[in-house]
Amino acid sequence: MKSKLVVIGNGMAGMRTVEELLKVAPEKYDITVFGAEPYGNYNRIMLSPVLTGEKTIEEIMINDLAWYEENNITLHAGADKEVVSIDRRKKTVQAKDGTSVSYDRLLFATGSNPFIIPLPGHELNGVIAFRDIADVDTMLAVAKKKKNAVIIGGGLLGLEAANGLMKQGMNVTVIHNVDVLMNRQLDQPSAKLLEQSLKERGLTFKLAAASKEIHDDGKGNVTAISFEDGEKLATDLIVMAVGVRPNIALAQKVGLHCDKGIFVNDTMQTYDPSIYAVGECVEHRGDTFGLVAPLFEQAKVCANHLAEHGIANYRSSAVATKLKVTGIDLFSAGDFHTDENSEEIVFQDPYRGVYKKVVIEDNKIKGTVLYGDTMDGSWYFQMMKDETDVSEMRDRLLFGQAHLGDSGTQGVSAVANLPDNAEICGCNGVCKGDIVNAIAAESLFTLDDVRDATKASASCGSCTGLVEQLIADTLGSDFNETEKRKSICRCTEYSHDEIRAAIPRNELKSFHAVSDFLEFSSPDGCHVCRPAINYYLLAQWPGEYKDDSRSRFINERSHANIQKDNTYSVVPRMWGGLTTPDELRAIADAAEKYNVPTVKVTGGQRIDLLGVAKEDLPKIWKDLNNAGMVSGHAYGKSLRTVKTCVGSTHCRFGTQDAMSMGVNVEKMSWGSWTPAKFKIAVSGCPRNCAEATIKDFGVVAVDSGWELYVGGNGGMKVRVSDFLTKVTTDEEVMEYAGAFMQMYREQGHHNERTAPWIERVGLNFIKDEMVENETQRKEFYARFLESQKYAQVDPWAERASKGVDVIDFVPLKQIN
Amino acid sequence: MSNWIEIGNLNDIPPLGSRVVKTNDVDIAVFRTANDEIFALRDQCPHKHGALSQGIVHGNRVTCPLHNWVISLEDGQAQGHDSGCTKTFNVKLDGETILLAV
C-alpha cells in the first residue's frame, strides 16, 4: 500500500521536489498536486525572456500535463482548486471547490506573493505585479494598444520587466525609492554604470522617488501616478516589482509555526512532522529565499527525507545573481558591503564601462560585484564558496584568472580565458571555438549533446570538466549543472553504483537479467553498459557467471590489442619484468616466423610484438606457450604488469629483494579482471627506480620493511600515489595488495582507474576499511584469492590449444 | 541478378557476434543479432577503416572497435552526429543456412 503525498503548490520548488522524489523512490507515494494556476509547471525565472519575445510559453514549460499523467500524479489545477483548509488531525486538505484529499505526508510549496504597495489607487485596472503567466499576458495585451508604462521597483525583476516592455514598444519609466538601482546586488558605482547603459537603451528613471497616488479615468482604469515632489506621470500600466512575501496565509491559518516564512529545520520539515515545506514560502535559519538555486537544493533534501533515506541536510549557501537583460554583463555574489572587518579592492574604468569590486575579509572573498567584464565572476564565486585564501594573489586578483598563471587556481573555469583555437579535447582535436559554436548553432544543452555533436570529451574523458565549464559559460543561467549521480549510459537512468547494488540484491546473473529488471531502453544495451555490466557480474559471481565474450571490447575478446590497421599486438607476461635467454630466443623466433614488423620494449618492462594478423594470433601464442610464456594481459582491464627494480639482489643501495617480491605479487594477482587497468610496481629502496609511486599499487622497500602506496597514475593525468601504510613482512605486502585490489574490484566503477576512485571515495575511507579494520582486510583478501581460483587460466593456451572461441580467429568463408 | 552464395550456418556466428567472409577484393562482416537476424556490411568503418566485425553488436547496430562510431546494420549509416556510410550486402537465411548475394 503506497503512502499518500499531497503537494500544495505547482511551482518550481514543489515540482522539483516531486521530480527528485520520483528519481529516488518512484513507487513510494501516490502523489496529488494542487496548483492555483491552470497550467502544468513552468520555469518562472524565464518569464522575462517571454516578455521580451525571446522565448515562448511553450519553451519555458518544465512539465506539461502529459507528464503528470505519465507519472500517475493527480493534478488539481485552477483557481477553484486553491487549498483553503487543512485538518491536521485527520490529515486531509480541502480545496475551494470542496475537493478533499487525505495525506500521510504534506508538502507546502506555496511560494510567495508579490508585494503590492497600498498606494491610493493600487486596486485599479492596469496595476499589476510581475509574477506569473497571467501578468505577462496582461503586459503583452496592454503593450499592443497603449504607449506608457511605469515600473515601480528598480530591482532585478523590475528592470527585467522594464526591459521587456520597452522591447514591446512602450515608453517605460522606472521608479525606485533609493538612488541605487538593484541595491540588493549592486553598489553605487556599478549601479550608475547600469543606469547609464539602460538609459542609452531608452529607459527613463525616476530615482529616490516617493510615490503618492495612482489616478484613474473614472472608469477604474489607471491613467497616471503622482509623487510626493508634486510630479505627475501619465501612464497606461503600472507594474509593481517591489519584492515578494512568503505565502504563509494557509500555514498560519492551520497553526504551523511561521515568522517571515514557514519555519523549517535542516531536513525541510515544519513543526508538524508530517508536513514539509520548500521554496519561497519557507524560513530556514532566519533566511528566506528568492532565487532558484537554493530552491533546487531544498527540493533534493526534502525528497531524500520524503523517501525516508534520511541522510541529507540543507544548509543555505551563497548565491550569485545575473541580470537577464541581453547585452548587459553584471555579476553579483555574496556581501559586497565593507565594514570595519573587511576591505575592498576596486577596479574602475568608466570609459569602457567596466567596474569590479571584490570584498575581502580574513583573506577570503566575502562578496563581489562585477559590471561590464564578468568573465571572472564564476572564479571569484567559486573561491568565495571554497573559502580560498587569496592573500597570495590579492595584488593580481582583479586582473582575473588569466593573469594568475595556473598556481592556486586548480584550473577552475580557466577555460573561459582560452582563445577560440585552444584545443580542449586532445583525443579528437576539438577546439574551444568548435564547441562554443556547436552549443549555439545546434542548441546543445547537455554534456551528452556536446559529445555527440563535437566528439569533445567522447574518448578518454579527461577534458569533461573543461567541456562542462564551457557549456556553463556559454549557456549561462540556462545550464543545468550535470548531476553528480550520473547514469551509466543512455540505455538507463541508473548509475554504476545502483546497478552494482541491484545485482546481488536481486540475484541478477546475466546481462539480460539486469537489463530486463532495470528496464533498459534497449534490451542489448550498448558498447558502454555491456562491458561494464559483464564486469560487475563477473566480479559478483566468481566461478558462477560465465564471461560473455560478446560483451567484451575486442581487445579483451581476442586477448590482444587492436591497432589502427586492424592488426594486433602480442605481449607475453614477464614476471616482475624478468626474462631468460630461452624466452628471448622464443620471442625472436616467433617475431621472425610471423613477420612481426615492430618489436618494442614497453613501459611495463615487457616486449611487445606489434602488427600480427588476427588469424596468426593462436599460432604465435602457441609458440610462446611452448616456451613457457603466458598472456601478459596487456590488453585488459586487469592486472597488467608488476614492474620492479633489481633491489638488493645486485644493487648497492637496495634494501629488500624487490624482484622476488614483484614476481610473487604478480603470481598472486595475474589474470584478475579489474574495473580498469591495474599496474603494480616494487622498488627496492626509496630511490624508487621502479616508479612505484605512480602505480595503482606501489611497494617501496625501506630498511625496516615495505611502504605501500595506492592510487598513483602516470597516464593522461599524472597522480602521485597516496601513502597507505607501512608493513614489515612479505606476507603483509601480499595481503594488502590482494585486499586493495579486491576492494577496488568490488567498489570501483567500470573504466574508473584507482586514482579517480580514491579521489571519489577518499583515502580515509580506504584506510578505515582495510588498514584500521583488520578483519575486513582479511575478508577482502580471502575474496580476492577465491576469485583468482577461477581467473588464473591462461587465455592464450585456451585458444591456441584447447579449442576455445576458435571461430573468432578464422574467416567464416573465403570466396574467390 | 545477384548470385546467392551459401556462406555458412546460422550457428557458425554467435548471437550478438560477427564473422568475416573474405573475397578477392573486400572483406564482408556478417552479423547475427539477438533475434537471429542476419546482416552483412563491408568490414570497414567509414571513419578510419576499423574492422566492424570486431565491434560490439547491440540491437541492429555495431560499435566500431577503433573510435566507437555506431553503425546501423540495416543501412550501413553512421548513427548520431557522425556521418558516413558503409556498403551493405544482401544476405538472407534459408532455414539455418546463410546466403550472401555477391
Image (cartoon, rainbow, N blue to C red):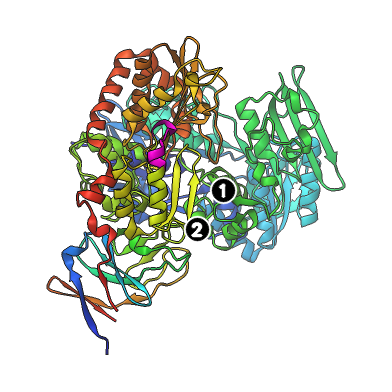
Quadrant in which the N terminus of chain A is drawn: top left
Name the amino acid type tagged 1: Val
Where's residue A84, x and y in %? 37, 37
Farthest residue toward the top? A704
Q: Tell me the quarter of the picture where residue A331 sits.
A: top right
Q: Is residue A309 left or right of residue A281?
A: left
Res A467 label: 1
Number of marks = 2
Q: Residue at x 65, y 29 (%)?
A: A384
Select label 1 or label 2 by which is in front. Answer: 1
Per the image, is A97 magenta? no
Q: Chain of mark 2?
A: A
Where's residue A275, x and y in %? 35, 28
Res A59 label: 2
Where's residue A542, x and y in %? 22, 35
Q: Is residue A646 visible?
A: yes
Q: Is residue A615 left or right of residue A132?
A: left
Q: Please say if A141 is above or below A667.
A: below
| Disc 1 secondary structure class | helix
Q: Is residue B14 left or right of residue A75?
A: left
Q: Tell me the quarter of the picture where residue A435 sits.
A: bottom right
Q: Chain of mark 1?
A: A
As measured in the structure, the alpha-carbon distance from the residue carrying label 1 to the one carrying label 2 is: 25 Å
Name the amino acid type tagged 2: Glu
Q: Which mark is first along the chain, 2 or 1? A: 2
Q: Is residue A234 left or right of residue A544?
A: right
Q: Residue at x 38, y 12 (%)?
A: A729
* Observer-nearest of A395 and A280: A395
Q: Which residues are magenta?
A: A575-584
Q: Please say if A480 is above or below B67.
A: above
| Disc 2 secondary structure class | helix
Tell me whether the residue at label 1 lies in contact with that at label 2, contact meaning CB atoms closer than 8 angstroms: no
